[in-house]
Image (tube, helix red, strand yellow):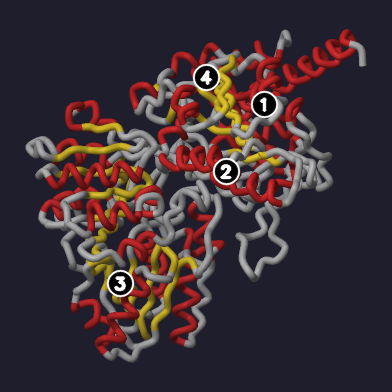
């Protein structure tokens, strides 16, 4: 091909990539407007990167599966042999084909838009985004379109890609392995461990593109945990580094076509988080997730969409969910979305609903406690410590996306007499930093307080964000105390309980709008179960959010003549409340436990152990996740899907008693304990 022809071909391909990038921004913006939320800045910054990868750089085959994503088909297991990943949307795998790993799974919406713009996914697929029963998850899972592995907890995609690259070399495959990363992931130790290994093993078939937009969840990276000069640091780890304008398609493409030289390639793409969308600048530095607070704000973004579409008149209608459902080929159920939705009026006699209870309580409680420090891992607003940071800035420590370091760091603080309160999502406490907790905190019995948010299936963030086995894991640690809040009263009083504990404490915390199920004059007490109703037919033991669900079921059961001894458990370790065992002994039919957790190692296991040790021969039924991961969906959907809701309780009572009560979901739905509508929506991870 002549040089002139090559140049014309190159220009045509670049024009196509520009079209794809523009389409990504438009599509994500339109989705954000219609759904009152979305990861918009990520689309603005990364559109050219992903468009260049899919449009020019990567050698991918044609998609040979239906372009409309299938419904969620269950998690991988021996009993689910037909499980498939979302990699099929990148085309069939082959020795000469490239592979793609999306490391920051919160970019999933941007990836879906990329797949649509490149003809790899049907437009209808985006209507399934974040819907119950869908594989098009908000935080991309490995069964989501374009995804090949679980990367939602960050920092793991690069290591998985490195392992894949090593295997491909050993198998004499010529295809390359591409990784898309965010700059915030370079605060994570595992990222550097992976780079070290890739350099040592000369994995020059790995090409990493980094969206260096300078922002993360808590704001500007330079104010959270600076990683610059990133190029020099990467070079010191043996990488072949190129720093380019992340919106320059020609330079992005050139970096992906280099002759291998024994070093992994890292392309640092400096980008603008507001590229093509000036209205977004008003949100800086908090741009991680966009949710509109007013209709006026939404209209500004609709006007920006008109500009992006380059049309004279474009009207963006925010359609009701019922209107769009009939366009979706795969039938899924809607989640509650949109902070601007009107709140339902509380049912007569329903409990008080309080907002951001922990945020306000912590500031008040810590006022006369100068030794209390609060540590954040880039989730300050999401864990309700932004108010503490504003009030006591000298006692707030930003640790970046580096939980392992944060735990050992907290241990060092505690050794010197300070009292660190570590805040992050529960999964990032025990899964990412277990050894650090064990050796730096638990073994020396230090007064470190770990406050874990989004316990169990309270989040639609999927398996990477759902803490379903934390009690089992943390309970095994010597010296560890475990508490779980069930309502606003316990959130308000848990800090007083913590203060008296000489050793480490792990708390499963509630956030956002929280019901007051228990009288405010009856605070949480360490080691003491809370009696909610008395009876001798069934002993019902519940913890956390399951208590509210159980209260609905117990209320209807009492109308059928079943007396229920309902006890709420807030202290999971140590567990020494003799009144619980006494209630079990008195129960006519047996005991039922309900927990927002796997039935392995949590409340149900605790009760089983205590009953066995005491020689209590009663039937025990455990309600919870049954040896399975969950997936991204709404709380009520997941409770029903996994047999953890009030109706599941009714069925278990029927089985224990040998009676049929004729209780329907409709009757249970009319039994209101609390109307919960959280401002701290889980979508804003």
Q: Which residue is mark 2?
A: 201
Q: Residue at x 26, y 62 (%)?
A: 570
Q: Secondary structure at mark 1?
A: helix
Q: Nearer the viewer, residue 380 or 410?
A: 410
Q: Position of residue 297 (x, y in %)?
A: 49, 19
First along the sequence among labels 2 and 3: 2
The residue located at (22%, 61%) in the rendering is: 481
Residue 273, which numbered label? Answer: 4
Q: Residue 379's image quarter? A: top left
- Which is more N-terminal, label 1 or label 3? 1
- Give the number of the mark in front: 4 or 3: 4
In the image, 476 versus 581, the foreground residue is 476
Left or right: 435 as drawn, with respect to 297? left
Query: Few, some or many C-alpha atoms within 10 Å of disc 1 (few <14, some 14-19, many ≥20)?
Result: many
Q: Secondary structure at mark 3?
A: strand
Residue 157, image quadrant: top right
- Residue nearest the viewer, comparing 563 with 56: 56
| Residue in view at x 36 percent, y 66 percent | 472
- How packed mark 2 is, by other alpha carbons closer than 10 Å (few <14, some 14-19, many 20 or more), is some
Residue lying at 63% horizontally and 34% vertically, measured from the top left: 262
Residue that numbered label 1 is attached to: 27
* Mark 4 vs 2: CB contact within 8 A: no
First of labels 4, 3 by sequence position: 4
Taking 668 as reference, is 674 left or right?
left
Q: Point out residue 75 in the picture as x, y percentages from the top left corner.
A: 60, 60
Report how far apart the C-alphas of labels 3 and 1 lie in the structure: 50 Å
Q: Secondary structure at mark 2?
A: loop
**Taking 315 as reference, is 527 left or right?**
left
């Amino acid at each position: 091909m002549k040089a002139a022809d090559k140049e014309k071909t190159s220009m045509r391909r670049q024009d196509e990539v520009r079209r794809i990038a523009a389409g990504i921004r438009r599509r994500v913006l339109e989705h954000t407007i219609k759904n009152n939320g979305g990861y918009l800045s990520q689309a603005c910054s990364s559109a050219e990167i992903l468009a260049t990868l899919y449009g020019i750089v990567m050698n991918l085959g044609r998609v040979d599966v239906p372009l409309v994503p299938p419904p969620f088909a269950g998690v991988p297991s021996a009993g689910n042999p037909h499980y498939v990943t979302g990699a099929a949307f990148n085309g069939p795998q082959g020795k000469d084909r490239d592979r793609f790993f999306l490391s920051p799974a919160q970019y999933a919406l941007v990836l879906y838009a990329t797949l649509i713009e490149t003809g790899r996914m049907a437009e209808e697929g985006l209507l399934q985004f974040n819907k119950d029963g869908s594989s098009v998850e908000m935080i991309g899972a490995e069964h989501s379109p374009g995804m090949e592995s679980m990367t939602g907890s960050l920092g793991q995609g690069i290591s998985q890609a490195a392992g894949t690259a090593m295997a491909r070399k050993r198998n004499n495959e010529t295809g390359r392995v591409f990784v898309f990363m965010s700059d915030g992931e370079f605060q994570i130790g595992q990222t550097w461990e992976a780079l070290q290994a890739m350099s040592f093993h000369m994995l020059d078939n790995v090409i990493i593109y980094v969206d260096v937009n300078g922002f993360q969840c808590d704001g500007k990276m330079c104010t959270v945990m600076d990683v610059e000069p990133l190029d020099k640091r990467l070079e010191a780890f043996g990488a072949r580094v190129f720093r380019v304008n992340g919106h320059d398609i020609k330079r992005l493409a050139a970096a992906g076509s280099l002759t291998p030289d024994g070093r992994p390639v890292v392309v640092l793409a400096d980008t603008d988080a507001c590229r093509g969308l000036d209205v977004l600048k008003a949100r800086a530095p908090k741009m991680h997730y966009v949710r509109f607070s007013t209709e006026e704000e939404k209209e500004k973004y609709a006007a920006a969409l008109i500009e992006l579409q380059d049309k004279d008149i474009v009207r963006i209608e925010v359609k009701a969910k019922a209107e769009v459902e009939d366009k979706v080929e795969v039938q899924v159920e809607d989640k509650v979305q949109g902070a601007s939705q009107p709140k339902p009026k509380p049912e007569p006699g329903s409990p008080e609903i309080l907002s951001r209870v922990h945020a306000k309580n912590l500031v008040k409680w810590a006022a006369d406690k100068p030794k209390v420090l609060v540590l954040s891992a880039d989730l300050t607003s999401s864990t309700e410590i932004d108010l503490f940071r504003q009030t006591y800035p000298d006692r707030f420590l930003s640790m970046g996306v580096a939980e392992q370091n944060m735990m050992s760091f907290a241990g060092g603080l505690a050794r010197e007499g300070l009292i660190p309160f570590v805040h992050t999502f529960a999964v990032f406490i025990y899964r990412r930093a277990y050894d650090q907790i064990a050796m730096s905190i638990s073994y020396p019995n230090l007064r470190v307080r770990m406050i874990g948010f989004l316990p169990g299936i309270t989040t639609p963030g999927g398996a990477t964000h759902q803490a379903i086995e934390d009690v089992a894991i943390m309970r095994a640690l010597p010296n560890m105390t475990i508490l779980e809040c069930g309502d606003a009263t316990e959130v308000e009083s848990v800090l007083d309980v913590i203060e008296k504990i000489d050793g480490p404490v792990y708390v499963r915390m509630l956030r956002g709008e929280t019901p007051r199920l228990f009288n405010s004059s009856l605070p949480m007490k360490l080691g003491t179960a809370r009696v909610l109703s008395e009876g001798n037919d069934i002993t019902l033991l519940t913890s956390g959010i399951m208590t509210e669900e159980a209260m609905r079921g117990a209320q209807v059961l009492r109308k059928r003549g079943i007396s229920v001894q309902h006890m709420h458990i807030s202290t999971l370790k140590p567990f020494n409340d003799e009144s619980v065992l006494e209630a079990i002994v008195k129960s006519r039919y047996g005991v039922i436990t309900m927990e927002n957790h796997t039935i392995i190692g949590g409340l149900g296991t605790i009760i089983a152990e205590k009953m066995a040790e005491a020689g209590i021969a009663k039937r025990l039924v455990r309600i919870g996740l049954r040896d399975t991961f969950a997936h991204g969906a709404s709380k009520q959907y997941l409770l029903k899907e996994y047999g953890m809701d009030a109706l599941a309780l009714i069925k278990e009572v029927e089985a224990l008693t040998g009676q049929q009560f004729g209780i329907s979901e409709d009757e249970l739905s009319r039994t209101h304990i609390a109307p919960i509508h959280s401002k701290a929506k889980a979508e804003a991870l």
